[in-house]
Image (tube, rainbow, N blue to C red):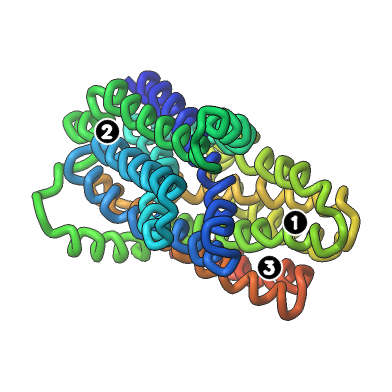
Amino acid sequence: MQRRTIAGLFAAQLVGGIGVGIGVAVGVLFAARLAGESVAGLAGATLAVGSALLALPVAAWMRMRGRRFGLAMGYLIAAAGAAMLVVTAWLRPVPLLFPAMFLFGCATTANFQARFAAVDLAPPASRGRSLSVVIWATTVGAVGGPLVAVPADRLCRHLGGPPMTGPFLLSASALALAAAIVTLVLRPDPLLLARKAGLAGAPPRAGGQRSAFGEAGRQALANRGARLGFAAVVSGHLVMLVVMSMTPIHLDHVGRPGVISVVMSVHLAGMFGFAPLVGSAGDRFGGRVVIGGATLLLMFSCALAASAGRDPLLLGLGIGLLGLGWSGTMIAGSTALTESVPEESRPAVQGLLDLVMGLAGAGGTAIAGAVVATVGYPALAWSAIAVLLPLPVLLRTRQ
């Protein structure tokens, strides 16, 4: 059943990742063309906030009805958002843009939550590897989504549709297919099966979601492993997102716009391409070792990006290592958190983690733009190191 679960999640991530990649690649650009650049920034923030806030209902559905129902609902909500963006492209009602982007943010929520479904039935010795394989599947979507967005747009225009309709149609179809895959393949549901086998605690009672997430917050702070895992995921994601999101603007400012796509491809390869190796390292050497190494790598990559100046090779190396450091904190931190909380609390704690991670990323990205505009990209990269300083303290904490 674990092999079947991993195969189903892998397939859903491949398809769903394409839907996410398409939307992320053209969503903000579509908003800019529809209502101007000022609105585009707000639309991008709406996407990030939607991804964060929708993590709670998705986690609640998983807690009560299993991974299959929660993931399928997450993908379907995102597909509805993509369909609303199609309507927006046809009819051009600006107010519809924001609820559409909010719902579309659930695509990222579902893709991130899928990593936890990979460890419900996994033996303790291979939890990191199982989780990392699901993250690795996102590579295809992250790289392939933007590549197919342009042909989809051209095809739809050729058939008489307005600009940007094709990518969102394809995204909605991919996300709906991902929902169908998890519905058909995750049978029996891995979380419900783990509960039945006594591997995931007793099933929760209906209702009391607010108290469940309140307890999740207490569990996240209850012991060293949970605190470390929570802090590693949130701080690693925050540092990666603020530096990565401002890198294209920096390259444009220093007269290197032609290498933006290459540098970002290197970054994506660092984020997802080595995930199975990172997961295996965590299983073999321990999550604390991987988190410590990833923290040092993130600090080094920020310093490298800050000092790269106009050199695209040096900046590309720094951004690539930034993605690899994120992979380490995400995989080892998620695994450490999952192993450190009681089984019956895991869905709620995992949902709370993605909520905080998403809100931190949204807020950090908004602040990063102001920092770059005021003091420049190097200052942003240097200051990002300060976010990581609590992690070495947590690594040394005994309780």
130 or 134, nearer to the observer:
134
Give, as a three-letter code, the residue at label 2.
Arg
The quadrant in which residue 364 appears is: bottom right
Residue 282, image x, y percentages = 55, 40
Question: How many labels, in total?
Answer: 3
Q: Residue at x 60, y 58 (%)?
A: 241
Q: Residue at x 59, y 53 (%)?
A: 29
Can residue 58 be seen by looking at this rendering?
Answer: yes
Which residue is denoted by mark 3 in the rendering?
385
Q: Residues within 10 Å of mark 3 (few under 14, many from 20)?
A: some
Quadrant location, the N terminus: top left
In the picture of the structure, the residue carrying the numbered disc 1 is 301
Residue 82 x %, y %: 41, 43
* Up/down of 268 relative to 366, above or below: above
Helix, strand or loop at label 1? It is: helix
* Residue type indicated by callout 3: Ile
Q: Position of residue 270 (x, y in %)?
A: 68, 42
The disc placed on residue 254 is none
Q: Where does residue 235 sit, x and y in percent of width and height?
A: 55, 62
Q: Residue at x 71, y 53 (%)?
A: 297
- Label ID, residue 68: 2
Task: Report the amino acid beneath label 1.
Answer: Ser
**Which residue occupies 43% across, 31% down?**
174
Of the image marks 3 and 2, the number of the one nearer the N terminus = 2
Q: Secondary structure at mark 2?
A: helix
Q: Dots 3 and 1: beta carbons under 8 Å?
A: no
